[in-house]
Image (cartoon, rainbow, N blue to C red):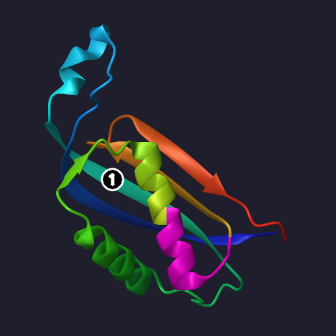
């Protein structure tokens, strides 16, 4: 059995997809989203190895360091970046991160350790 904590964060930002197909050509222009992050982190025991509020605050501090102009960053890229932050802060462990634009469409990236 595996135990995880889940924390949610958000970041307002501007981005664009310069190579967007004609069907969604509006995405080529710089536009605003609120990016919602849902990060699931494996813990080794069930007595607050990682405390929700502390993890949420640490991840938000890292998000706050990002420029508001994310340019060509995709949800997938943002999720990978969040997983990298979790590993830097809490070591190598199973992590998944889902990033959505305006709490609508989303991408999810999962990292599983070899152990």
Res. 61 image quadrant: bottom left
Secondary structure mostly seen in magenta is helix
Is residue 80 rendered to the left or right of residue 67? right
User: Is residue 79 positioned above or below 49 on the image?
Assistant: above
Q: Where the C terminus falls, by quadrant? A: bottom right
Most extreme residue toward the front is 19
- Nearest the viewer among 26 and 1 is 26
User: Magenta residues?
Assistant: 83-93
Question: Which quadrant would residue 114 be assigned to in this image?
Answer: bottom right
Mark 1 residue element: strand
- The residue depicted at 25 percent of the width and 72 percent of the height is 65
Q: Which residue is mark 1?
A: 36
Image location of residue 13, percent across then percent down: 19, 51
Residue 80 in magenta stretch: no
90 magenta-colored: yes
Answer few, some or many: residues within 10 Å of disc 1's Cα (few below 14, many 20 plus, some between 14 and 19). Answer: many
Residue 34 x, y percent position in the rendering: 22, 49
Residue 2 in the figure: left or right of residue 111 = right
Q: Position of residue 93 (x, y in %)?
A: 68, 73
Rendered view: 99 above or below 89: above
Residue at x 58%, y 70% (from the top left corner): 41
- Image quarter hosting the N terminus: bottom right
Query: x, y (%) of residue 28?
Result: 21, 25
Pick the front one: 91 or 10: 91
Q: Which residue does the image show at 30% across and 9% down from the upper left?
A: 23
Residue at 53% x, 79% y: name it. 88
């Amino acid at each position: 059995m595996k135990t995880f904590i889940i924390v949610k964060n958000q970041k307002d930002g501007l981005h664009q997809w310069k190579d967007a197909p004609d069907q969604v050509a509006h995405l080529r222009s710089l536009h605003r989203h609120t990016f919602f992050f849902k990060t699931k982190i494996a813990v080794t025991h069930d007595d607050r190895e990682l405390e929700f509020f502390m993890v949420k605050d640490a991840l938000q501090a890292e998000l706050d360091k990002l420029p508001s102009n994310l340019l060509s960053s995709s949800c997938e890229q943002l999720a990978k970046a969040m997983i990298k932050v979790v590993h830097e802060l809490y070591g190598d462990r199973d992590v998944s991160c889902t990033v959505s634009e305006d709490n609508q469409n989303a991408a999810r990236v999962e990292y599983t350790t070899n152990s």
